[in-house]
Amino acid sequence: MTNHLTALAVHAYYAGELDAGRRACERLLATRLDDNLEHQVRANRTWYTQRLDDLADCRFQRLDIEPAFPGWSLFNPTILRHHDRLIGIVRSSNYQIVEGRYVMPEADGQTIRTENLLVDLRPDLTVERVRQIKNPDYPTTDFPVTGLEDCRLRHTQTGLGVSATIRNAAPFDGRCRIATADLDYDAAELRNLRVMAGLQTQEHEKNWMPIEPGEGFWGGWLYSASHNGHAVTADPDTNCPGGYLLRQRHPAPALARGFRGGGQVVRWGQGWLGVVHEVAHMPTGHRVYEHRFVSWDDSFRLAAISEPFAFRELRAIEFAAGLALLGDRVVVSFGVRDAEAWLVEIPSDAVASLLHEPVSIQGGQGPG
């Protein structure tokens, strides 16, 4: 069966049978594949992926603001519904990606620098106010990547905060770590930085998905949609203020093994809604990020998924770092090519119509 589906995943494109090819890729990824075949299937699937506006009614809004410094980029925004309004943080960095290489200004040498901009958004998603965020003080190493990367806004028991990737915090070794900090909104300042220890010293820790407060849960993250075959959350440790414990949840279907963190996880009916990305490594050597909406039940059993989609550009790097419910709208914030910052709003009922049971739950049938 695997051989037939693999052939179909290739030939359906040239035969113009795009739905058949798309279903073949999903069915293959819902089984256990060796690494080489999985990489091939993910690369093939990018030729069947559709843009979000081909799947649902939606509206895009670009965040056209001044970067932290002239010539710097804007990308990978995060958003949060706070006191019935939308706020966000936009990442601004000193590099550009040129033919797959990071290129920094000569004055910065080979150091990648990141600053973050706090934005207030109007109901129509246009920008009302922008302030550069003052970074927290922390001891550093000489590793040439500075700043808090890809922040996720989150509510904490004391107010507002962020979790983000950090690489030059002493005494760590330059590998990606998750750091948390409190956000003083009025002062536009991050304080009380704390670096979370990783499971293993050799692993990168990135893209934990903050779980917005809801009944029975406060202040943690979805650590992984599939870690050793299970959904895993990082829950507050009641015996250690500021500490967290990894908690194994429900078994996750094979399809979830490629899900990587995106925006926040928010209450959705009696369960949770998130947006995740999956990575395809293309034969040309570049990467492609594709996204999909995912819902879990109240105890984090994977309940439903959408088809994978691109936001603005097919076969490119796009990255969602924020998701919020605003009335009857779902708003997602994302970056394109580490060079542009965007928002997209989708009616909640349109998102619901995109969600279907994962392939493995349907007894091997492709998505309808």
Image (tube, grey):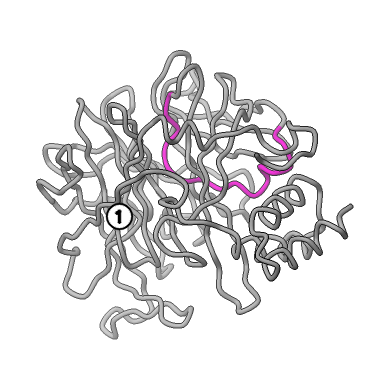
Give 342 or 5, whichever is nearer the viewer.
Answer: 5
Q: Where is residue 340 in the image (x, y as percent from the top left)?
A: 31, 63
Residue 221 percent across, percent down from the top left: 48, 33
Residue 89 forms part of the magenta stretch = no
Q: Is residue 56 above or below residue 99?
A: above
Residue 81: percent from the left, percent from the top?
Answer: 27, 32
In the image as oriented, which residue stretches furthest toward the top? Answer: 215
Q: Identify which residue, 170 or 4, lies in the foreground.
A: 4
Q: Is residue 26 above or below residue 141?
A: above
Q: Residue at x 61, y 38 (%)?
A: 225
- Mark 1 residue type: Trp
Judged from the image, the secondary structure of the residue bearing numbered disc 1 is strand
Left or right? Give the position of 48 relative to 138. Answer: right
Q: Residue at x 62, y 68 (%)?
A: 281
- Mark 1, Cα crowd under 10 Å, few <14 / some 14-19 / many 20+, is many
Q: In which quarter of the image is residue 5?
A: bottom right
Q: Is residue 260 above or below residue 232?
A: below
Residue at image location 64% in from the left, 50% down from the top:
258
Q: Viewed as shown, does residue 87 lie left or right of 240? A: left
Q: Give the range drawn in magenta.
A: 252-267
Q: In which quarter of the image is the C terminus?
A: top right
Q: Is residue 333 above or below residue 324?
A: below
Q: Nearer the viewer, residue 191 or 91?
A: 91
Q: In this view, does 217 lie to the left or right of 14?
A: left
Q: Which residue carries the number 1 mark?
A: 342
Total marks in image = 1
**Residue at the far front in the pictured view:** 16
